[in-house]
């Protein structure tokens, strides 16, 4: 049996006629950049996430970049984040001349560990503290980072909170007072990606920044268009971070189905657990710690032999992927930051032991069953 890691075609065939007529409408309008479709998407995404505002941008990377730019992050500044994420999370910090300050992750959720965050910040000199600008927690694989302590600590140090919610649209977090919030509505900025493999994927590049503050919203819109405050009057050096109308029109259709698709992902994660009745010896399924994990990825931890398992699954026709094989603090381009092996051991361990399995909404039960059988064969528990 063939079980690909991700297959976007069944989803497309379901919405093809709707999508095609929307594409035709945008083409007929000949309005391709921003415009009414982008505004409509911004309003709907803000509403969906429970944020006051949303600003459509050119990618998830640019969503993070524009948030940092709107905060004036630049040379000499420090931005705190996790080393266990997609490169963009840290790339944007370095591109602005600021330095990432890495804090290790929680071994069960793979998200930045608030206790280690507090400890690391306490160890900084007064001079270093004065350079702290923001923290970027990543809601990795579709589960929210532990935002309550993160926000509290950020406020203590005068840092902005920029949520990297690229993998987490619709994920939820519960605060200790019982308040439930969605990813992107908790910090000062929420950054989303519409890369095709995300839960809400465009037919190309796209992203969104959410926020709740009026001034922040105004600044984001100015930065999106070269820092232009009125025709050809540039208050800041912004960029071309505009979202195009075709992507917005397609995303508006897909947004209607997002919760249905997300529920199917959550159900599939449950089927994995249900079908592997016996506890597997070498394999740990993901921990659902926060309120709503949206399973952009279903990532297992393999105690020994992760690369062997990947190879074994591949021979059985099962797709899998390693997210991410090299933690960011050990990337060649960050050599000058002088991090070494052993500095952030939980992230390094995750990079060695995790593996993403198929979880996309249209997976059939017998496909998951086949993956579980293959896992049990490898595990020695069958
Ligand atoms: C996908 C992703 C991004 C970047 O989004 P793009 O739209 O590809 O630029 C940033 N952070 C994380 C965690 C991501 O998964």
Image (tube, grey):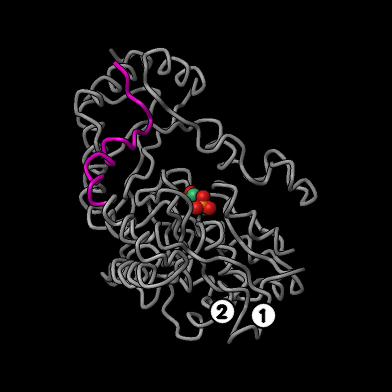
Instruction: Name the residue rendered at 52%, 63% in the picture.
Output: 63
Numbered label attached to residue 222: 2
Q: Quadrant of the N terminus?
A: top left
Instruction: Name the residue rendered at 55%, 80% in the picture.
Output: 219
In the image, is residue 13 part of the stretch drawn in magenta?
A: yes
Q: Is residue 64 left or right of residue 12?
A: right
Q: Is residue 11 above or below residue 117?
A: above
**Is the residue indicated by label 1 positioned so its CB lies within 8 Å of ligand 1?**
no
Which element type, helix, strand or loop, lies under badge 2? helix
Residue at the outermost front position: 28
Q: Position of residue 359 (x, y in %)?
A: 31, 36
In the image, is residue 174 part of the stretch drawn in magenta?
A: no
The span picked out in magenta is 1-18
Q: Quadrant of the C terminus?
A: top left
Q: Position of residue 272 (x, y in %)?
A: 26, 31
- Location of mark 1 (residue): 236
């Amino acid at each position: 049996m063939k079980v690909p890691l991700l297959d976007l075609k069944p989803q497309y065939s379901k919405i093809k006629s709707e999508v095609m007529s929307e594409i035709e409408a945008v083409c007929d309008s000949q309005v391709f950049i921003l415009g009414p479709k982008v505004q409509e998407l911004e309003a709907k995404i803000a509403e969906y996430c429970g944020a006051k505002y949303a600003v459509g941008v050119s990618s998830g990377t640019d969503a993070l970049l524009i948030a940092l730019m709107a905060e004036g992050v630049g040379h000499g500044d420090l931005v705190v984040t996790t080393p266990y994420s997609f490169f963009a999370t840290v790339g944007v910090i370095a591109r602005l001349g600021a330095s990432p300050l890495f804090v290790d992750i929680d071994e069960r959720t793979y998200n930045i560990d608030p206790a280690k965050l507090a400890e690391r910040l306490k160890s900084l000199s007064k001079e270093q503290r004065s350079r702290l600008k923001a923290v970027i927690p990543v809601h990795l694989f579709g589960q929210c980072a532990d935002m309550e302590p993160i926000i509290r600590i950020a406020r203590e140090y005068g840092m902005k909170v920029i949520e990297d919610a690229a993998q987490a649209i619709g994920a939820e977090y519960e605060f200790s007072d019982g308040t439930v919030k969605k990813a992107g509505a908790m910090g000062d900025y929420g950054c989303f990606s519409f890369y095709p493999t995300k839960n809400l994927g465009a037919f190309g590049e796209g992203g969104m920044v959410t926020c709740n503050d009026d001034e922040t919203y105004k600044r984001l819109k100015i930065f999106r268009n070269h820092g232009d405050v009125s025709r050809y009057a540039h208050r800041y050096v912004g960029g071309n971070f505009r979202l195009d109308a075709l992507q917005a029109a397609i995303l508006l259709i897909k947004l209607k189905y997002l919760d249905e698709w997300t529920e199917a992902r959550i159900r599939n994660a449950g089927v994995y657990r249900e079908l592997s009745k016996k506890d597997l010896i070498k394999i740990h399924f993901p921990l659902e710690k926060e309120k709503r994990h949206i399973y952009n990825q279903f990532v297992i931890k393999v105690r020994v032999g992760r690369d062997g398992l990947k190879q074994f699954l591949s021979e059985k026709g099962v797709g899998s992927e390693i997210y991410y094989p090299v933690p960011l603090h050990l990337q060649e381009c960050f050599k000058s930051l002088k991090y070494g092996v052993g500095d952030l051991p939980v992230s390094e361990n995750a990079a060695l032991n995790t593996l993403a399995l198929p979880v996309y909404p249209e997976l059939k039960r017998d496909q998951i069953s086949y993956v579980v059988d293959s896992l049990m064969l490898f595990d020695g528990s069958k």
